[in-house]
Amino acid sequence: MEDEPRRSRMSEAFFGRRRGKTIRPAQASALEVGLQHYRLDLARPAPADLGSLFRASVSSIRLEIGFGGGEHLRQEALTHSSTGFIGAEPFVNGMAKMMVALAKEPADNLRVFDDDAALLLDWLPEASLDWIDLLYPDPWPKKRHWKRRFVSPVNLDRFARVLKPGGRFCFASDIDTYVNWTLQHCRAHPAFAWQAQEAADWHTSYPGWESTRYEAKAIREGRRTAYLTFIRS
C-alpha cells in the first residue's frame, strides 16, 4: 500500500508514506521534466569531486535531508550561489512542489534525490560534505516507532563519514522528545560536539534563517523550535 513505509533490502525506511493527494497534471509534468534535470543517479559512482555534479561553480557542498516542499532549500540555494546544495525528499508531492518552483526559477547549484536519504549518504564519498541540515524531521512520536527516527547511531556514523572535519550538522524541531533524543545521541557520539554556549542558544534561530511552513504551524499551535548545531571533530 502507498501509505505504508516502503521497505527493501537497500532502504531502511526512515520515512513514512511516499504520496499524498493526487498531483495535478501540471505538477506531474514539472516533476518528470525537473527530475531529468536535477535528480542524482546513484547507479553511477559518486564523483570524487562533488562540485562536478553542479552546473554552477561551487566551493562547498550542503545536504538537506527531508526538504518537504523545498521552501528552505530553494531559498538557501538561491541566496548562496557558490554553495552546491543536495536535497533528499522521498515524498512525491513535496518533490513535485519543488520542481514546479524550479521550473519558474532554476538553480544551477542544486541537485535532488527522491528516495531514502540513507541510500544517498552511503553513495557519497568520505569527507565530501561541509554541512548537513535535518529540519523538522518526522518525530515518530510513538515509542515503538522510535527506531525510524533519522537521528540514530547508524545515521550519525553516516554523517561522520561524509562530513569534513569541522563540518556542521544542524537539526531543528519543535518536538521536545525528539530534541532531547538528538542531544543524547549526538553527545554520545565521539564525532560530534554541540555548539551551544548557554541555554538560550538552542532557541535562537540560525543566521539568515528562512522560516518554514512547519515552523509556522508549530508557532500557531504554541510549540517552540529548538535549533541545534553540532560540529564534526
Image: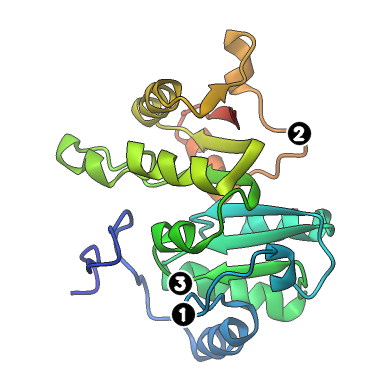
- Residue placed under numbered mark 1 in the picture: 43
Residue found 50% across the figure and 40% down from its top = 160
Residue found 39% across the figure and 39% down from its top = 151
Residue found 52% across the figure and 27% down from its top = 192
Numbered badge on residue 174: none
Dot 2: few (<14), some (14–19), or many (≥20) neighbours within 10 Å? Answer: few
Dot 3: few (<14), some (14–19), or many (≥20) neighbours within 10 Å? Answer: many
Identity, as a three-letter code, of the amino acid under mark 1:
Ala
Visible in this render: residue 72? no
Question: Nearer the N terminus, badge 3 or badge 1?
Answer: 1
Cα separation, mark 1 vs mark 2, equals: 36 Å
Residue 25 appears left or right of 182: right
Residue found 50% across the figure and 91% down from its top = 25
Specify the quadrant of the image occupied by residue 78. Answer: bottom right
Residue 151 appears left or right of 207: left
Question: Nearer the N terminus, badge 1 or badge 2?
Answer: 1
Residue 219 placement (x, y as % from top left): 53, 34
Front of the two marks 3 and 2:
2
Identity, as a three-letter code, of the amino acid under mark 3:
Asn
The residue tagged with tag 3: helix, strand or loop? helix
Specify the quadrant of the image occupied by residue 117. Answer: bottom left
Residue 186 placement (x, y as % from top left): 44, 27
- Residue placed under numbered mark 3 in the picture: 93
Identity, as a three-letter code, of the amino acid under mark 2:
Pro
- Residue placed under numbered mark 2 in the picture: 207
Residue 7 placement (x, y as % from top left): 22, 66
